[in-house]
Image (cartoon, rainbow, N blue to C red):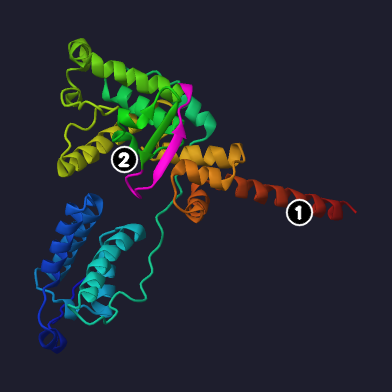
Amino acid sequence: MEHFYFYRSDAAISAGIVDYFEFAFQEAKRKEDCGKYSSASQLRIALQHLRHFLKGRSLMLADLHPTLVADFCDYLVSLRLSGGTVGLYINALRGVYHRAVKEHLVMDSHPFSNLRFSKPSTSQPVLSEKDMSRFITLSVKPCSWQWLTHRFCSCSYYLCGMPPVDLIRLRWSQIDLVHNRLIYNRQKTGHGAMLKLSGEAKFILLEFRQMYEHRHQLKQQGWGHCKCMDTWMNGFVFPFLGTVNRVESYHQLKNTERIMNHCLKKLGAKINLPHLSLYAFRRAWATTAYIDYKADMSDISHGLGHANVRTTYLYIQQLDHTSFFHLQDKMMRGLRKRVEQLQTK
């Protein structure tokens, strides 16, 4: 796809030239300073794609217009990015533009209007309660990342599908072992959440407490290859974060997620569950609660830590189509029965 634009407009010159990339990278830095590392990373990737699309040419804020944005979307699609990924990148760039408008750096010409993106596919199967029991009883080699991953993901399920980012950062100061409660603030929303500790979850947590207390001996018993044991910080339940520096801890978190997702592929292959990922256990808890135990939506919303129950409705709709498929089968059986009755007359 070849595009040749002359994006410098008279409006840009008369309004005062403000370079979009310069302003956008300042915005990415601001996000990092606020601890929004994931958003900053998405914005930087989107800017890299935009630079490649423009072949290194400059772009002023006032030069953004719907045709340019639409052609950039086509360019991203030509890279075989999913509709959801394209939407994430465009939303990141749109946020920069709207901030510039808010700061009166450019007059809003609505360059991002009338854009529609497909939602990410949710076709991957959701773990059933039977699948979870197979995963939990899986025999895993000790002194390995697979063992750490297995215990971590089991604990996530026991704690109402607790998000991995929150579980990785879990501290002992947030756990009340006397009253079997866990109180913490969600990383994503900042909202407080309180969960009851089941016996299974408490067993895993105490397992890791003993591991921390004997970590030096464990290194000599087969854990030496797991570098996270060397940097395990006092206060954290799990050994994945070795610094309180926000930037370094973010990179450690992303690296931990990458390693554990790789381990889950291997663990899933052993029990014919090829689509395992860290967030599969969060979806599994919600699906089992909703379909198998007919849980109230507000209770599921509380367990997932959603600030608004409407978010949970959208979440559940994307989780599993089992009940809908059962409805389809039931209706078709009824229709077939009536047709057969008429045909036999």
Q: Where residue 343 sits in the image (x, y, percent)?
A: 84, 54
Residue labelled with disc 1: 335
Which region shows up in magenta?
Answer: 186-199
Residue labelled with disc 2: 165
Viewer can see residue 288:
yes
Residue 198 is a magenta residue: yes
State left or right for residue 149 relative to residue 310.
Answer: left
Mark 1 closeness class: few <14, some 14–19, many ≥20 residues within 10 Å: few
Three-letter amino acid code of the residue under disc 2: Val
Tell me which residue sits at (26%, 74%) in the image.
69
The C terminus - image quarter: bottom right
Question: Which element carries disc 1, helix, strand or loop?
Answer: helix
Three-letter amino acid code of the residue under disc 1: Leu
Question: Which element carries disc 2, helix, strand or loop?
Answer: helix
Image quadrant of residue 194?
top left
Residue situated in front as seen by the camera: 124 or 167: 167
Give the Cα separation between the discs numbered 1 and 2.
48 Å
State left or right for residue 142 relative to residue 223.
Answer: right
Tell me which residue sits at (29%, 58%) in the image.
80
